[in-house]
Image (spheres, rainbow, N blue to C red):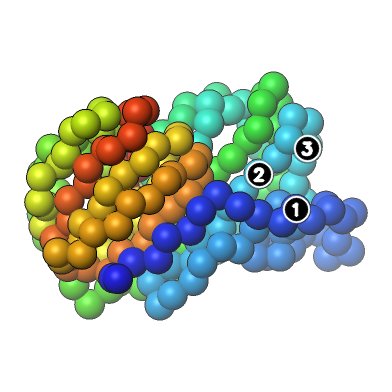
Amino acid sequence: MSDDYHPDSLTCQDVTSEPAQGYVEVADEPRHYHRFINDYARVYDVRFAPGERSLYHRHSVNTLYVTVYDTRVFDQTYGETDGVTHELPSGLCGCRPHGRETLIHRVRNDGHGLMQMIGAEYLGAPKVVSEQPLTAPYHTPIDDPFKGESIRCYAIDLPPGQSTGLLDYRFSGLLVALGDATLEIEDDGVSRTIGFSPGAFIWHDGPIRRELRNVGKTPFRAVLGEWL
């Protein structure tokens, strides 16, 4: 297979007190769980129960963010006396340019349910990239709210019983599921059936020829990040 599937499973850690130096690197923040790394991406899973907060932590690499559930998050920049509250909808997808705009902050879940986001640091361009955006059935381009330059985003909404047909993914990228669904995925003529849960993801190395078939009873909602 040309990709890596990661189901939605984690071992929780306890959040420690604020570090003596004031902040930690994002890779060392206890609620930013490392999930996957290759030459192009480092993927982590962010989870907070209602009222939980992070340590101050630093982002210094361009990062794709995907919001799994609707959530309300309080965001406080390091050194500021106050912060701002954001209402983040499920399916928000964008690349923040931390490489040129380093961010040190802490966040708190001010909502009533689980706050979960997938972050994927952009470590470099794959050998094959696509000059043109993807045009494909059930794939809708997403306007990046952060105006990032490293990754394109698409929303995927595939009803039960439907198929995308055979697609040319002329790029490498990350697919993140937003809900429970069962798909049959065919990559370069090889098929497998995968049960997705919220926050589960697949990295694929491109180019590949892929078909997504929804063989379950629920719609498949996901976002796809295309590495440039």
Look at the image and tell me in which quarter the C terminus lies.
bottom left
Mark 3 = which residue?
52
Amino acid carrying mark 1 in the image: Cys
Q: Position of residue 227 (x, y in %)?
A: 29, 61
Amino acid carrying mark 3 in the image: Glu
Q: Is residue 161 toward the left or the right of residue 39 in the image?
A: left
Q: Secondary structure at mark 3?
A: loop
Residue in the picture at 42% in, 60% down: 5
Instruction: Give the Cα distance between marks 2 and 3.
Output: 9 Å
Front-most of residues 217 and 52 = 217
Q: Position of residue 10 (x, y in %)?
A: 65, 54
Q: Secondary structure at mark 2?
A: strand
* Label 3 environment density (alpha carbons within 10 Å; few <14, some 14–19, many ≥20): some
Instruction: Give the Cα distance between marks 1 and 2.
Output: 9 Å
Does residue 134 appear in the picture of this structure? yes
Mark 2 = which residue?
47
Q: Earlier in the sequence, mark 1 or mark 2?
A: 1
Q: Is residue 224 toward the left or the right of residue 22 in the image?
A: left
Q: Earlier in the sequence, mark 2 or mark 3?
A: 2
Mark 1 = which residue?
12
The answer to whether mark 1 and mark 2 are in CB contact below 8 A is: yes
